[in-house]
Image (cartoon, coloured by chain):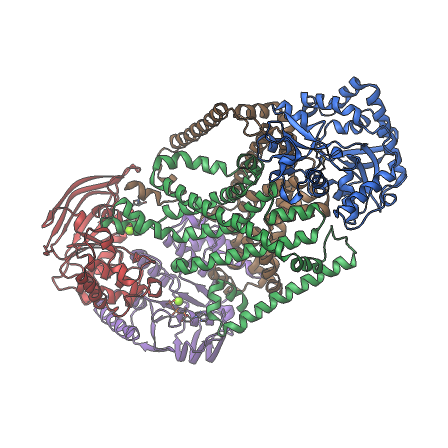
Chain colours: A blue, B purple, C brown, D green, E red
């Protein structure tokens, strides 16, 4: 009897979710005795909260958001890493209007989900002497690329260098990206799996991680075959030029050892947030990054 | 149910709504002859409807009543009255025959075949033969009031209380229905409230005019002829007299 | 001048006077068709003239294309949304009727609950949708509850108003016939309240889809609202418009279906 | 039985019969107060008893705390939202009235536009909010338009119905007095339509806040909707409830203000 | 404006709504004596209101009319009529005096001081002295119809068309208003449509009954006495006669 679990993604299905889709398509979850239901969120700020409220078993979140959530007392743990490097960027249109971060002073920045922008965007702006209060933050939800392309915001935070860049390019807009890790933000895991701290089952999570690891290996070893498997999941929305380009740019970014734990790196990021007064308590990595 | 002729007399009555601080009716006397029509006239708002509703048992809790009601031949009013109002009060979701038999929904007795046959007969009697299955909305005002009359007859109560039953009808329709009602309700004790002096003169054996505030009732002597009366010089004079005595309250 | 006079009649009355009803309605159908076509042509030419990118305003041709291309997916998601709406309607209508009945029959209940019910109306239901998701999860339950909640108040008010505004003459008549409280309810109040209930249903049928779609917006993985959201996020605004079109069509058919049923079941309501 | 009778009267009539009105309304105020307190106590004890985490359901005490603590921020954002609502109301009401007038005066316009107007109603306005943002930007304009759009149809219908349902007797009378088309409009149709317009305004005042808040939800940097979104994302559900409370209070005051004004300006509407 | 007495005669008229396929009125003849009251009786729906509205110029475009209208003393009907309906048609947003002066809103003439004074006098005349600033909603049905009467007088037209002006009133109020109207409209040519045979007999100098479908009019000879008449035996007989001839259409 397979164990049923619900996994809620961070965004609609895209190449970042390659290992999950491959594991599902190739039956790696089933091998582990798991029956995973993959759900896309309706509101990108909800997945982690639904895990905390025990409405779903697993969700994909961001280390930035996770740190803040845990500090705020949400019962969450990181159970695995999907993408272990920053992907997020502060993205502007490459039309000569904004050449450096400093040009963002007095401009509007669209964000997909509220929460971590003060820590990350604030730090990046501080590195060039602009205060966070000198920009206007607008929560634009799903409409990241379209808001930037239509000029309704001057920059977006939440556009990924492997995806939104390509999306904009395909619509005919060249984007310029400022990377957080190059502007004062310590390196972090972009996408992590989170589970409920009170109710998680270590055994099941271990099995899940094993399936993900196997799928990642398959992708690295067989890029073309895995692409075909990936688009077969939802051909009508996945099989297009955008995903093809994004797939290529994502191949090198999957965490090869999803379950591996680097407590120091998590503590370093918590400390950074705490020092910048983004969080009022400093969560200890060993409390929310258990070794399964 | 054997028919018994009854008479009602009201003696020195007064009526007051509990949430009002003035009586509507005071020192009120009324004698309804057995098996005859009694009409009450009075200006708008003088308390005619209130009196009728009290007699019908519809005002028990929120009015103060004093005065004696003497009944002859029946024990209580409550179970022995049928009620007709200005609006025909046909339930729009029931067809004619179901409306005529409406009272059976509230009695212990099931509608028997003989009852049903009688209902059809009554519908014929009021001139609506063949319309038993029509819905009220398809009928004209006069036809609807005819159905209401048949419903009243179907209830077969010795006392009938009528509150301006014909006042929504045009002159000719009213005239015809007055005749019909006088004929089919001939053996009932009828209390007829009306605004129309001519109607009262045409139909009633006893006539009262409500006057003053709080209102009392003064009785008017009528010619001793059978109803429905034909309008003649005497009635014309009485009508003028009624209007004159009603006008007192209008100044 | 004559025009002004005839306009004072309600539509239903006007129709009675129309001698040949069919050519008239054909004419108005034609008119609707022509204005719709004009509008679409206008839209298409705006898109072409200003060379609007499709994520700002898709061309009607693209939308139509999507409708054909993705009909199976659109159909699947419509089915989901339709289920949510129907269940929400059933839940909301029965709760509203029950609540109204209770308020009618138990006076203290009415006195204590009515003010709270009215006060609660100031809180926009859709604003608590995110919390509803946390309570009820991503399944169908939260959308059904959402749709039911959003229709609850209008239904309750309509039912309650209908039940307590029974023409007093009807009640008087039935009381003189010896009706008990329950008989009054069954034979007079309830049937007399049906037209009011029907107008409650009409309102409900219009707003329930909004409830379901808002529910899907806040949390769901299927349904037309979800589809619209996804399409929007993928910058496929043409698909979003296609879903929007289907949603509108769904609402309209639901309304006419309800109207038809009501007119069949309560033919005397036009009194 | 007497209860049933008195219930058949509308509230306003009932009040006429109440001898000492003040103690009665004091009593009902007290009742509202008591039921509100009961509800709050119940809520608090549920939170305590089930030890609900505050992101599932915050305690009323926490919400109240937030109200006091963050009153300046709440006030600021309420002010923004209030501005959006007022401007949206002004825009929507004037557009609705104008549109209704045009339909009344220019028959072809009515024949061609009315079906489209009605059909457009099937499209839920809030569903096009995301695109509206792309067209109008994330400033105040998009929220104002959103609020105006959401009230446009009810206002137009009310105005149009009011304008064309002038009692025909009034029109006859004025026409026999030699009134021209414009004089009819000015001296008869418009004043006679005021009560209908007033009910349009009442509806508008209720739904306009919804439009503004939905607009803020889709993208904004200030306003109560923004605050709610922000608080929700930061898991500060207590703050979200505080904002929700303020929003409800804002809507209610707006409604009563409008009602007061209408009753002052159109005292004959109760006919 | 010097007053001119006028008379209207309608000869062999027929009237048909354009969207209907049957005429409402056919072979219709009517003579309204100069400065006198003419009453038209007829069953509901026979076309009384249609005729009146045609004469008032309210039906021009959507009816087919044939027949001659001869006017004496006036050029056109259009500018010389005042209209009174069953409903009082008081604008609820205007007070009594503004309602009385309502016609001035549509004339080129500004309301002068003398006009204003006359309006107050007319309000006194109909028995509402001191109520000039009251809003219609505060008045009873009878008082409202009095204001309508004052408004008609203020228009000061030689012809007055009245469509059941008193039928919404109770018997006594109606009686009083009939008397008042007969008095204040004494020198006008009045066309009175009514359902009430008694009203017609009391007020009119000429009386027509509409009969048949399409309807024609038959004339009834009335006693040559001054109006308002007191009801006597002769009128009572005439009333019965009217009812009998109206009843023909009801079978
Ligand atoms: N439920 C009630 N509570 C208090 N007062 C009432 C109630 N019902 C009626 N009244 C008052 O009692 C008075 C008499 O009313 P009623 O309806 O009996 O008069 P009526 O003679 O039937 O008038 P009409 O001829 O207009 O029908 C009126 O002044 C009315 O305002
Ligand atoms: N605008 C219209 N178009 C077509 N037919 C009409 C119109 N108005 C009235 N009718 C019809 O013309 C006939 C006469 O109506 P009218 O109102 O003139 O009758 P009436 O004698 O005044 O009736 P009542 O006594 O009830 O007032 C009726 O059968 C009615 O249905
Ligand atoms: C393809 C893709 N695009 C955007 C996001 C949104 N996103 C990227 S990083 C981040 C958190 C920083 O605010 C968010 C919300 C995503 N998850 N996946
Ligand atoms: Mg009465
Ligand atoms: Mg008429």
For the residue pair E61 and A272, the one nearer the viewer reads as A272
- Residue drawn 45% across the image and 58% down it: B151
Q: Position of residue C256 (x, y in %)?
A: 52, 38
Q: Position of residue A124 (x, y in %)?
A: 71, 38
For the residue pair B106 and A39, the one nearer the viewer reads as A39
Specify the quadrant that holds the N terminus of chain C.
top left
* Camera sees residue C190: no
Question: Which image quarter: residue A222?
Answer: top right
Q: As drawn, which residue projects farthest toward the front?
A: A129
- Residue drawn 60% across the image and 35% down it: A153
Question: Which image quarter: residue A224?
Answer: top right
For the residue pair C161 and A245, the one nearer the viewer reads as A245
Q: Position of residue A28 (x, y in %)?
A: 85, 27
* Camera sees residue A207: yes
Indicate left or right for D194 with A170 as reference.
left
Indicate left or right for C66 with E40 as reference.
right
For the residue pair D149 and A243, the one nearer the viewer reads as A243
Q: Position of residue E1 (x, y in %)?
A: 11, 55
Q: Is residue B169 above or below residue B42?
A: above
Indicate left or right for D13 with C127 as reference.
left
């Amino acid at each position: 009897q397979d164990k049923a679990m619900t996994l809620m993604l961070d965004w609609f299905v895209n190449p970042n979710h390659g290992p999950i889709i491959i594991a599902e398509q190739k039956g790696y979850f089933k091998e582990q005795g798991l029956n995973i239901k993959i759900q896309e969120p309706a509101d990108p700020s909800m997945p982690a909260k639904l895990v905390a409220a025990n409405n779903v078993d697993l969700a994909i979140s961001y280390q930035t958001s996770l740190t803040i959530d845990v500090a705020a007392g949400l019962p969450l743990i990181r159970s695995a890493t999907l993408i272990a490097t920053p992907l997020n960027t502060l993205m502007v249109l490459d039309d000569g209007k904004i050449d450096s971060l400093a040009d963002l002073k007095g401009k509007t920045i669209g964000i997909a989900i509220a929460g971590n922008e003060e820590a990350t965007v604030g730090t990046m702006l501080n590195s060039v002497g602009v205060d966070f209060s000198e920009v206007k933050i607008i929560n634009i939800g799903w409409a990241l690329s379209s808001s930037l392309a239509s000029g309704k915001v001057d920059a977006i935070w939440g556009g990924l260098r492997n995806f939104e860049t390509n999306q904009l390019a395909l619509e005919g807009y060249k984007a310029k990206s400022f990377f957080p890790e190059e502007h004062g933000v310590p390196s972090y895991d972009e996408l992590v799996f989170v589970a409920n701290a009170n109710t998680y089952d270590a055994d099941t999570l271990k099995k899940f991680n094993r399936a993900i690891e196997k799928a990642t290996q398959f992708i690295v070893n067989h890029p073309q075959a895995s692409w075909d498997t990936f688009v077969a999941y939802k051909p009508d929305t996945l099989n297009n030029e955008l995903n093809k380009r994004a797939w290529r740019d994502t191949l090198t970014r999957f965490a090869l050892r999803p379950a591996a734990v680097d407590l120091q790196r998590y503590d370093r990021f918590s400390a950074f947030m705490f020092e910048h007064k983004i969080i009022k308590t400093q969560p200890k990595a060993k409390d929310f990054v258990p070794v399964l | 149910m054997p028919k018994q002729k009854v008479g009602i007399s009201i003696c020195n009555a007064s009526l007051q709504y509990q949430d009002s601080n003035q009586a509507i009716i005071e020192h009120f006397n009324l004698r309804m002859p057995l098996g005859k029509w009694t009409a009450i006239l009075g200006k708008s708002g003088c308390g005619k409807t209130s009196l009728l509703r009290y007699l019908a048992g519809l005002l028990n809790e929120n009015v103060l009543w004093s005065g004696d009601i003497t009944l002859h031949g029946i024990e209580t009013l409550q179970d022995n009255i049928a009620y007709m109002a200005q609006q025909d009060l046909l339930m729009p979701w029931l067809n004619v025959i179901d409306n005529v038999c409406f009272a059976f929904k509230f009695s212990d007795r099931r509608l028997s075949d003989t009852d049903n046959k009688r209902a059809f007969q009554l519908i014929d009697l009021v001139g609506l033969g063949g319309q038993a299955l029509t819905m009220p909305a398809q009928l004209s005002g006069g036809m609807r009031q005819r159905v209401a009359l048949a419903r009243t007859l179907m209830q077969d109560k010795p006392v009938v209380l009528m509150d301006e039953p014909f006042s929504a009808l045009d002159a000719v329709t009213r005239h015809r229905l007055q005749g019909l009602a006088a004929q089919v309700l001939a053996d009932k004790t009828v209390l007829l409230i009306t605004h129309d002096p001519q109607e009262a003169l045409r139909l009633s054996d006893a006539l009262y005019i409500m006057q003053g505030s709080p209102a009392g009732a003064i009785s008017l002597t009528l010619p001793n002829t059978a109803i429905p009366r034909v309008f003649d010089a005497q009635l014309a004079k009485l009508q003028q007299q009624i209007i004159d005595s009603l006008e007192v309250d209008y100044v | 001048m004559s025009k002004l006079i005839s306009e004072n009649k309600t539509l239903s009355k006007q129709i009675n006077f129309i001698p040949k009803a069919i050519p008239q309605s054909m004419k108005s159908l034609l008119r609707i068709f022509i204005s719709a076509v004009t509008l679409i042509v206008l839209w298409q030419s705006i898109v072409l003239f200003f060379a609007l990118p499709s994520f700002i305003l898709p061309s009607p041709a693209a939308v139509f294309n999507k409708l054909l291309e993705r009909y199976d997916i659109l159909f699947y998601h419509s089915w989901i949304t339709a289920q949510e709406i129907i269940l929400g309607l059933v839940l909301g209508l029965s709760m509203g009727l029950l609540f109204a009945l209770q308020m009618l029959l138990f006076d203290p209940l009415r006195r204590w609950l009515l003010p709270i019910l009215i006060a609660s109306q100031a809180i926009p239901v859709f604003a608590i949708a995110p919390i509803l998701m946390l309570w009820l999860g991503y399944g169908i339950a939260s959308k059904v509850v959402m749709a039911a909640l959003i229709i609850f108040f209008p239904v309750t008010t309509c039912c309650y108003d209908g039940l307590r505004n029974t023409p007093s003459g009807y009640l008087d008549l039935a009381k003189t016939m010896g009706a008990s409280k329950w008989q009054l309810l069954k034979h007079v109040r309830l049937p007399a309240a049906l037209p009011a209930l029907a107008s409650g249903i009409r309102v409900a049928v219009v707003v329930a889809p909004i409830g379901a779609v808002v529910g899907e917006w806040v949390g769901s993985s299927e349904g037309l609202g979800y589809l619209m959201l996804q399409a929007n996020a993928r910058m496929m605004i043409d698909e979003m418009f296609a879903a929007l079109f289907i949603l509108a069509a769904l609402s309209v058919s639901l309304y006419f279906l309800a109207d038809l049923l009501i007119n069949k079941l309560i033919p005397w309501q036009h009194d």
